[in-house]
Image (cartoon, rainbow, N blue to C red):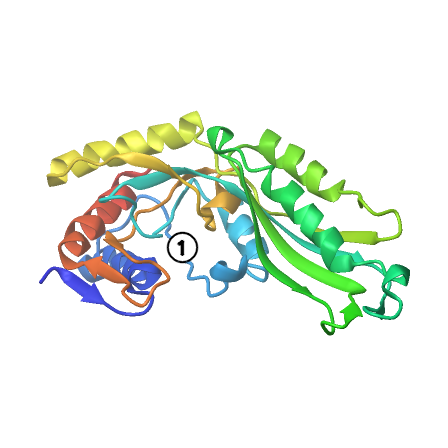
Amino acid sequence: GDKAFGPGIYDMKGGAYVAFHAVGRFLKSGERAPLPVTHLLVSDEEIGSPTSRPLIQRLARESKVVLVTEPAREGGKVVTARKGVARYDLETFGVASHAGARHQDGRNAIAEMARQILKLEAMTDYQSGITVNVGLVVGGTGVNVVPAHCSARVETRVPTLAAAEAMCAAIEGLTPHDPDVHIAVRGGLNRPPYEKTPAIAALFAQAKGLAAEIGFELQDTSSGGGSDGNFTAPIVATLDGLGVDGEGAHTDHEQLYVSSLEPRAELLYRLIATLD
């Protein structure tokens, strides 16, 4: 029917296809876009864009707007705000000892990490839009040994720069419950928050008007997921989620809706054609 399945088809091969189609119309017709167009494909976005971020930000500084073909949200909505993302590696260092003969000599690094995890998870505040997730924990060498080391990977998502600064300070300021256990914290803000500025609101209004001309109502939303739009929004007006509609991103049932291909490509084409 209307569903096409495949790995990454919604997030975000479909968006790359739509962008190629929109830009390709100018090339095929010989029509000149009002502004030069740079189409950048990023291969390391899912792991935080560690190598592409400087290029993304340089191109943003050279551009009037940034149009991101990440997938649409919730039935075709575009994205005008995203949470910022901070990631941390947390380690606890205790003292190893025999769990039976010399249990009292040990200092349990896993027990300390467990206390820190409870503190971190308690920082989640849904009302404020702040979440903290301890997603990976590794520790110990054997069940008969008091563990001397434990590590955890932590991610927090924040809606504003002020919230990001507060959360980063809280995580970086963690102290041990057990004075004989040492804590090390490494990391920081990976993606700054993407806040809806007046310039972004104006760009969305332009897109909304163009969508109405095409024949559909365009709405916007804020997303908890990060994208490379987080890097560009603090620099220049950025409109995200211009890719295809679908569902199941990052799953084995990922799908795009075929009926979204044509209108999304048309919207992107008209946006490029009306920017000056």
- Mark yes or no: residue 58 visible: yes
Vertical placement of residue 137 versus 195, above or below: below
Judge left or right: residue 161 versus residue 37: right
Q: 147 or 247: nearer the eye?
A: 147
Dot 1: element:
loop
Residue at 73 percent across and 62 percent down: it is 150
Judge left or right: residue 223 versus residue 216: right
Residue at 88 percent across and 47 percent down: it is 179
Q: Position of residue 56 (x, y in %)?
A: 52, 53
Going by the numbered disc 1, the residue's amino acid type is Thr
- Seen as rendered, the residue at the extreme front is 101
Q: Position of residue 85 (x, y in %)?
A: 55, 46
- Seen as rendered, the residue at the extreme top is 198
Query: Which residue carries the number 1 mark?
Result: 38
- In the picture, which quadrant includes the C terminus? top left
- Mark yes or no: residue 62 visible: no
Q: 115 or 82: nearer the eye?
A: 115
Residue at 19 percent across and 65 percent down: it is 4
Vertical placement of residue 154 versus 146, above or below: above
**Residue 80 quadrant:** top left
Q: Position of residue 129 (x, y in %)?
A: 48, 33
